[in-house]
Amino acid sequence: MVERSWQRWQDWAALVIGVLTALSPLVTTTDAAAAWTMVVLGVVLAATSLWSLGAPRSVSSEYVHGVLGVLLFIAPWVMGYSGLAGASWTSWIAGVLAVAVAATAIPVASAAHRGAVAAR
């Protein structure tokens, strides 16, 4: 199976999740910790999705999406903004979606990577 760049829907979904997470402090009530956490994790998620889109055989980028999803999910408790409903729910939903997208992308990226290695 040959994977072409900029084609995998999971990476586009991760890009959207990252951008929306980074922009969410504009529309939800946040404090400094919540705003910085969501902006930084959202930007990193969006950046790694661009990496995945450009290099579809990169399996490690898909694992990074999963790790960022877990970090987003636990961030309200770790960063102390679990009392802010909008910011917390944004982190929880974005985290779950990022993990789900990563879980569906890892097998596809792994297959593409195996195909590329076998072709050498």
Image (cartoon, grey):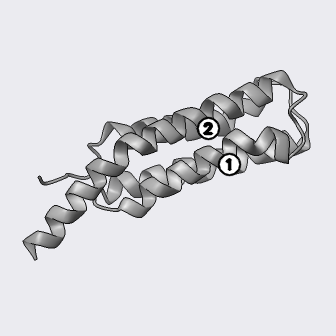
Q: Residues within 10 Å of mark 1 (few under 14, many from 20)?
A: some
Residue drawn at point x = 52 percent, y = 41 percent: 99
Q: Is residue 26 visible?
A: no
Q: Secondary structure at mark 2?
A: helix
In the rendering, at what x and y percent does residue 74 appear? Answer: 73, 43
In the rendering, at what x and y percent does residue 73 appear? Answer: 68, 39
Image marks 1 and 2: residues in contact by CB distance under 8 Å: yes
Inspect the image, locate mark 1, and give the three-letter code of the amino acid beneath it: Leu
In the rendering, at what x and y percent does residue 61 appear? Answer: 44, 59
Observer-nearest of 74 and 2? 74
Furthest residue in direction bottom, as rendered: 120
Residue 90 quadrant: top right
Provide the residue designation for mark 1.
71
Q: Secondary structure at mark 1?
A: helix
Residue 117 position (above or below residue 113): below
Residue 120 quadrant: bottom left
Left/right placement of residue 73 relative to residue 36 reads: left
Provide the residue designation for mark 2.
95
Tally of numbered tags: 2
Residue 76 position (above or below residue 85): below
Inspect the image, locate mark 2, and give the three-letter code of the amino acid beneath it: Gly
Residue drawn at point x = 33 percent, y = 36 percent: 9
Left/right placement of residue 46 relative to residue 115 reads: right
